[in-house]
Structures are given as C-alpha cells and as structure tokens.
Image (cartoon, rainbow, N blue to C red):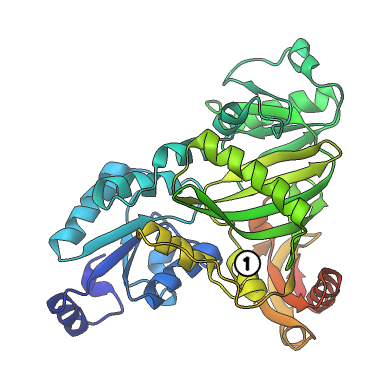
Amino acid sequence: MSINDSFITYIELSYMKELGLLKTIIFIGTNKSGSSREAIRAAERLGYFTVLFTNNERQIQQRKEYVDVHEMTLVDTTNLAAMRKEIRLLQSKGNEIMTIASFVDSNVARALKLCEEFCPNGTSSSAVDIMENKAGTRASLNGLPYTPKFITLPPKVKLEPSTIEVFPRFPLIVKSSSSTGSKDVLQASDLEQLKRHIRKLNEKDPDESIIIEEFIEGDQYLVEAIVHEKKIQIAGVIQQEITYGKRFIITGYGVLAIVPKQLNDSIMEVLSAIIEKFDIRNGALHVEMRLTDNGWRIIEINPRISGGAMNNMLKAAFGFDLVEETLKLYLGEKPSLTHKHRHFVFTQYVILDKKGILEKVTGKNRARKSPGVVEVYVKPKKGTQLMPPLSMGHRYAYVIAQGRTLELAKSLAKKAAKEIHFHLKQ
C-alpha cells in the first residue's frame, strides 16, 4: 500500500514533510485489540507517523478499522529482506525511522534486528531471540534454582522411558519449543499419554524441539517489567487464575496494588538473575512464575508486555501506560512508571464450554453499569465460529473492575462478567 492510502491526506503529509514532522515508528504485526494495538495508538498520541507491516490480508481488507495506522503495508513479516526493502522505500519518501517495534509473539526479535540496522536504540535482539524459543530459554537458565527440572527432545528423536527418569513422578508438562498463548502446552498423567502428546506435536511440526518438564504446584504470578540501563522497574505483579481444560487457560488476573516487601524482594531476585543471564541492558519482558514451598519456579519468559487487557488493567491499577513507556524506551528515552494512583484491579475473561456460530451477545451494557467496572470488551462479531478454549485467543470477552481490596475487585469483575451471554447457533 502506498503512503497516499493512509488516512492522513496528501496535503497534511506534504505539510508534515515540510516541517520535518514525518518521524515514523514502524510496527511489525498487530492484533486488532490488546496491547499490540494500544502501542500503535500510543505512538499516534505521542505525535509519530505510524506504519504497520502486516502479513494479514484481512487487516488490509479491514483498513478503515485501523484509523490509528497511518500507513499499512502488506509484507511477509518473517522475511527480513522484504521488510528492509519496504523500510528503504519509506526512507526514500521522507520518513525518518525513529524506531521499529513489535508487541506480537515471534516478531519482537525481528523488529529489534531491523532496529539495530536502521535506528539503533541500545536494545539487543540476541537475548530476545533466545527468549522467543522456550528450549533456548530453559537451556540459558539451566542451573538457576528457579528453573524446573526439564529435558529437551530434539526433532525426530524417539522418547525412551529412561529419558524421563530425571522426573520423580507424573504429571509432566510437554510443550513445543515455540508454543505461545497456551497453544501446544499439554499435561501428561502417564507414559502412554506423554508419548501420544509427543507424537501429536511431532506431527504438527517435525522440525521443532519438544520440552518435557516437571509439573509445578503453587500459586501462579505474572510479573511485568521494563529494564533501562540494566535497572529493573516492575510495572505490575499479577496473580493469575487458571482454568484447566484441554489447555491451561488464564481466565483471571488480579493486579496487586500493594506488593508485600518480602514478595517484591524475592521477585526482584529472580528478575535480576534473568537480566544477568540474558545480559539485557534495555528491554521489556514478562515472566510467569509459580511460588512453591521451595521458592519461585519460572514457567516462561516473553520479551514484551503481555497481550490482551494487560496494558489497560495496569492503567486502571496505577495510571501509567506501559506500552507508551515501552515505546519511549525503544526511542532511546527513559521510561517512567510513576504511580498516579493505586487500585486493586481484577480482570475476568469469559470462555465458552460449547462451540457454535455466534448469533448475538447480550448483557454488555449491564456489565458496563455494574459497580466497580472500568472496562468491558467483547471480541467476536456475529457469525463468528466460537469454541471452548484451546489457546488464549479463544477468550471472547473480559471485564476489568477496581476495588478497595483484591477480593472486592475480583467479586465485582466476576459478577459483571456473568451478565455477558453468548448466544450460539449449533
């Protein structure tokens, strides 16, 4: 798509060029909603010209729904050479590339590689490359007390019973090295089920390594953080509620307005070990961990803010905009996570227990008017095929609520979420 296909007029563009105002941020991939889309909106608010590189033809077809994207380009976002060509084309048109970023799984490292070439900002793609691969992450953190027992099965290697003798008992977790959003993460309760899961993952991607690891008991937390000049700023500590079905689906997030000192100190200890191991100078990340009787165990690390409602729930809790501060980091500025207020916040996601075609959704307004509710979001449109969750992408609505305590925020969010009903045609 050419620059004249954007929603900024040719006259406005010419005027911006004259004033040297075409300072541009390129985003590689976005979801229609959630943190990745909020980042584009934040860039527009900050006064930057926004360019989206996408390999999603549907987004091109729905161009008018992306008014915060000033220019949209259809390009293979797995192909660095193709994206380099588009970047040079932008530069030839007068765009000054200020940063290149992604808030989407598997695109973060590619964005940083391109940023290192066209607009260096002190971030490194090498650590992100490792973090985007779960086998690489486990290998890098091996030996730390926070790493669960694990083994990595190389592609096409058959599982021998002796291989899993390192684990004292079942259940075990088996997952693809590149799994994201709870896709391809399975629980095995015995050896036969473990073999079936491995066969299934091998059939899906024969060239992918498979990780087998111990099942960790304990409360699960999500920690959002930014690193600037090797100094860690925690953006939020969030308790997670997990719904166990065919997959592990996070359906509840409780943001702690106040983190007890002992808990905060122990989290900082884990984050510091991660930052040192990966040699991260500047960057954003989130870490999922479980608190066991023997301390923290790292479940996974991702080199970006969590998707979905995370940015909005942190805004509701503390008043800052994490994607905006992350963009400032990528622009070479110092991010600030100053609290404007402190609220306990709970986000309840809505999932379904049956599949069907969506006919209508009722109860959205009742949910919005419920006490303590600050946001209600419903994702699918009429006519969409809905199903019980096999990944985080199969969560179809959420409610964010505030409260004086976490328990109050949780009860308000859950009560409001019950107002939302998906009417399906089988």
Residue 175: percent from the left, percent from the top? 67, 34
How packed is label 1: few (under 14 Cα within 10 Å), some, or many (20 or more)? many
User: Can residue 159 be seen in the rendering of this structure?
Assistant: yes
Tell whether 280 sits left or right of 121: right
Is residue 388 shown to the viewer in this render? no
Mark 1, residue position: 309
**Position of residue 27 in the picture relative to residue 106 (left or right):** left
**x 35%, y 58%: residue:** 332
From the viewer's perspective, is residue 154 above or below residue 113? above
| Whether residue 301 is situated above or below residue 157 in the rendered picture | below
* Residue 316 drawn at (x, y percent): 65, 75
- Rendered view: 250 above or below 156: below
Give the residue type at disc 1. Ala
Residue in the image at 28% along x and 61% along y: 98
Judging depth in this view, the residue of 313 and 197 nearest the camera is 313
Q: Quadrant of the C terminus?
A: bottom right
State left or right for residue 326 relative to residue 209. Answer: left
Residue under the point 69% across and 81% down: 374
Q: Secondary structure at mark 1?
A: loop
Q: Quadrant of residue 65?
A: bottom left
Tell me if 72 is positioned left or right of 353 in this view. Answer: left
